[in-house]
Amino acid sequence: MNNMLETIFPNWTQGERFRVTYRIANTGAAARQIAEDICLEQTVEVTRSVIPAEPIGSWILGRIESLEETFNASSEAVISYAEEITAWELPQLLNVILGNSSLTPGVRVEKVQLSPKILAAFKGPRFGITGLRHLIGAPTRPILATAIKPMGLTASALAKKAYAMALGGLDIIKDDHGLSNQPFGLYAERIARVSEAVRKANSETGGNTLYLSNVTGPIEQIWERARFAKSEGADGFLVCPGLVGFDTMRALADDDTLALPILSHPSLLGAFVASPDHGIAHGPLFGLIARLAGADASIFTNYGGRFSFSISECRSIATDCLAPLGKLATIFPVPAGGMTLEKIPDLHATYGTNVMYLIGGALMAHSPDLVANCQLFRELVEQEIKK
Amino acid sequence: MNNMLETIFPNWTQGERFRVTYRIANTGAAARQIAEDICLEQTVEVTRSVIPAEPIGSWILGRIESLEETFNASSEAVISYAEEITAWELPQLLNVILGNSSLTPGVRVEKVQLSPKILAAFKGPRFGITGLRHLIGAPTRPILATAIKPMGLTASALAKKAYAMALGGLDIIKDDHGLSNQPFGLYAERIARVSEAVRKANSETGGNTLYLSNVTGPIEQIWERARFAKSEGADGFLVCPGLVGFDTMRALADDDTLALPILSHPSLLGAFVASPDHGIAHGPLFGLIARLAGADASIFTNYGGRFSFSISECRSIATDCLAPLGKLATIFPVPAGGMTLEKIPDLHATYGTNVMYLIGGALMAHSPDLVANCQLFRELVEQEIKK
């Protein structure tokens, strides 16, 4: 293999390294072996015997920066990678972070520290917290969001709901993420009717309620749907990166011909966070990766509801949504899933004001008067911030 | 909510239902509650109190067809869904199958039984086993595949390897899935050089070695890369659906202007199969879903290597690759990951002849003579099928 030495790109100037912290469900020599395997698996994918020490072994190969035993018979390994191997592309960045090692038991991404040049390669959220607050006209308070549903209603029935929700003073109305282009609820009719209904309510209230249409769908149709929604007056998009890829969301956010806010939905992403022993921790997944992928707000399932996230996991998501990240905008954490009006005081204590509350089904179930339910939602939040 | 009844699409003829079998890590009343939650969560996402019994409750809502206690304090629930709610789209089909319930602990998809109309909505693999065998000129034997690597080599160094591999008689040479468009290994140069090298070897040997370029990358560039590869004479594509979405792979397979075979790579998909308690079982994920998404061959990590799959999990993948599935072509199961030449007799006993063996690093490490290593790989397989 020595003749390979001469064939390596000769005059490359090496850049910085970025770091990924892995939790390894093992200790001692076994943990070190797994960490060394990660260094290979995420980069060269061959055994050390067939790679030239310079420069592949010293540069392209992952490098263990630290390895410490932690708790629960686990270790924490910080592994650094050459920033260039990401090709400055989101799919390849995700591939380097976990890719093949997702198939290794007992390996979980706990933290990702990107280099300045990687961060500069991503535009990130187009609006973020500041931009969304400006669009809504709500400079400091929590943002109130809901969803039109259930699947099976006609477009006009959904539009009636949206109209009531906008009259009731909510800031964001999104399609339920299961509303696609079903034969009984076609996309075009829904978007036209609901956009019109929200516009009508805004003209009556003087409000700025935004309608976000679900553009998750076949890849050939996503941009068509997004352009149609924009042309009909929809104000932004709901995207499920677990269903269509984080990079599809990134491309929608980057598209200057669309230039509308994006709300990220966690459908199918639960597999990554279901176990403390593998996948990707909540903060990096719903915070950092969602921001790199251009989400202006990131939905996750709140603690205490019908899902499994703990309060500390939810806090870690909010932290990663709001933490400094190069020049990338901060984004709204969006607790959702089994949220009820009764929880607002507790939610306020946990999340403060830089949050978007998404209450869906419970807002419909609270009483038969949807306008009043939405007004109550808003009043309860306003009471909390006055306390 | 009664006034909603009149607003539901009035004259819709209901089609068939399709079935998903979930393993629920619970028993008795708790398991039933989880199964009932799945019925709501995957469809209407509101409580039963706010949905009209007819037709949403009886049609759109998921329905428990059976619920039985199994073993390990678990239950198996078969839940049926109206086929129309998939909108005949892959992202929405995946959303109905697991979507939000991926965020519920202790829920795993074990089996998916699609309706004829859903199956007819997908073209599936363009080549499949029969088509790939025809391209390669190998009507019955196992197909031999390898990868060019490691990342960090120049295009000409990778081309030299590909040339040796093709001379050695391998059928398929793919880019390592980490080879993207790194500044030290640009896509265009690699594809041009490697295509040329494989063509040269084929002209010398009279063989039909195929080169599959990795088109996984930013969504705006994937088709550009695919068209470029085709124009340079590459014979197909490697796609990582975990990085760019299953539906992106499906769209590449469906594209009549490309019309080249696709090899699916499991990067980042490990999160779905890492635990027996959540995610999606191996067979449906690497077999059925890969086929719906147009893969002609589906890579997974083989048992006994450096990954965690058991022999029965690997067999279940092969079964789902080869089982009848409407009019969709059967595809090659592709065991990979820590495969060595020594394992071929055992592999043959497990997989038989309808298999593609992917041996990467071990083929390079076996001896310094890559041509001889590839010839040995082929001879060892041929010895097995003569036995």
Image: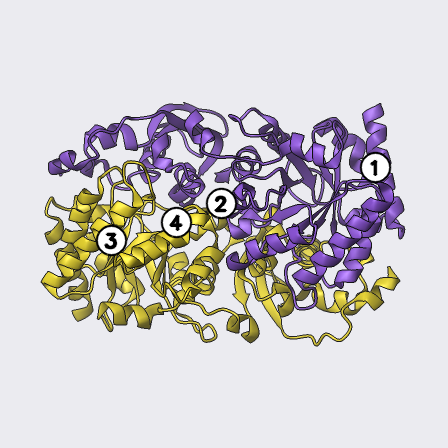
Chain colours: A purple, B yellow
Circles 1 and 3 on the same chain:
no
The residue identified by callout 2 is: A247
Query: Which chain contains the residue that carries disc 2?
Result: A
Question: Mark 1 or mark 3, which is nearer to you?
Answer: 1
Q: Amino acid at mark 4?
A: Thr
The residue identified by callout 3 is: B146
Circles 3 and 2 on the same chain:
no
Above/below status of A147 relative to A137? below
Depth order, front residue of A155/A19: A155
Circles 3 and 4 on the same chain:
yes
Q: Amino acid at mark 3?
A: Thr
| Image position of A266 (left or right of A153) | left
Crowding at label 2, few (<14), some or many (≥20) Cα neighbours within 10 Å?
many
Q: Secondary structure at mark 2?
A: helix
The circle drawn on residue A378 is: 1
Query: Which chain contains the residue that carries disc 1?
Result: A
Crowding at label 3, few (<14), some or many (≥20) Cα neighbours within 10 Å?
many
Q: Position of residue A212 (x, y in %)?
A: 68, 48
Contact? badges 3 and 2 (CB < 8 Å): no
Residue located at (53% from left, 33% from top): A288
Alpha carbon separation for disc pair 3 and 2: 28 Å
Alpha carbon separation for disc pair 2 and 4: 11 Å
**Label 1 vs 2, first from the N-terminus:** 2
